[in-house]
Amino acid sequence: MRRQPLPRQVDARKLTSTDVEISGCQPVSDFPRFAAGLCDNGGEVDVKLHFFRDDSSIHRLSASLATRVSVVCQRCMQGMPIDIRSEFELGIVWTEAQAKALPRELDSVILGEEPLELLPLIEDELIIETPFTNFHPVGECQPAGPVAYGEEQPETAEERDNPFAVLKDLKSSD
Ligand SMILES: [Zn+2]
């Protein structure tokens, strides 16, 4: 199984004409606009791209993306993992007129004389698919405040359960 990064640019006309599939594994850090909305830029995006011409001779790109990234929970402001998956189809054209001639439901990318830049195309889709606000399931938020000591806080728990501490609280509230 190939786990290599994608080519940055491709000759889309050549790929669609020969019917080519490209798959790759791209670090999230290669998508800075997408990573800016995340908790960190760790992880990778699995990408599958299929370039082909359909029965109407339309040049098409059929893409599928999958990644697991960490976003910020808006309730506790800690990281939480989410899965992002997307499948989309684009018509590849070289002029505005060709774009207008595409079936209405098919989004287009107009290339002109330029090669097709793969990363911005994928990044736009990742951004569209990222929810604006994210929350842990109820009851699964991380404790607020300093978490530097993480799991090692037995003393705090004992204090809370200590009956004398409760008595102390009752007295002081009198
Ligand atoms: Zn949370």
Image: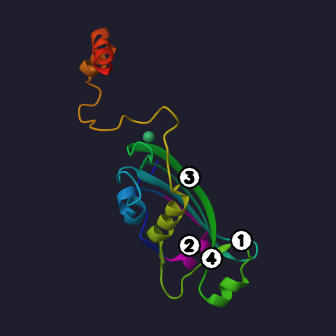
Check mark 1 vs ligand 1: CB closer than 8 Å? yes or no: no
Q: Secondary structure at mark 1?
A: loop
Decide which of tag 1 and tag 4 comes sooner along the chain: 1
Q: Quadrant of ligand 1?
A: top left
Decide which of tag 2 and tag 4 comes sooner along the chain: 2
Q: Which residue is mark 2?
A: 15
Identify residue type, mark 4: Ser
Label 2 crowding class (10 Å Cα cut-off): few <14, some 14-19, many 20+? some
* Magenta region, residue range: 11-23
Q: Which residue is mark 1?
A: 54
Q: Which residue is mark 4?
A: 108
Q: Seen in the image, is 134 located left or right of residue 153?
A: right
Residue 169 is marked as none
Q: Nearer the viewer, residue 153 or 6?
A: 153
**In magenta segment, residue 67:** no
- For marks 1 and 4, give the CA distance: 14 Å
Q: Secondary structure at mark 2?
A: helix
Q: Residue at x 48, y 80 (%)?
A: 115
Q: Nearer the viewer, mark 2 or mark 4?
A: 4
Q: Secondary structure at mark 4?
A: strand
Callout 1–callout 3 Cβ contact below 8 Å = no
Identify residue type, mark 1: Asp
Callout 2–callout 4 Cβ contact below 8 Å = no
Q: Nearer the viewer, mark 1 or mark 3?
A: 3
Decide which of tag 1 and tag 3 comes sooner along the chain: 1
Callout 2–callout 1 Cβ contact below 8 Å = no
Identify residue type, mark 3: Arg
Residue 145 image-quadrant placement: top left
- For marks 1 and 3, give the CA distance: 24 Å
Q: Which residue is mark 3?
A: 85
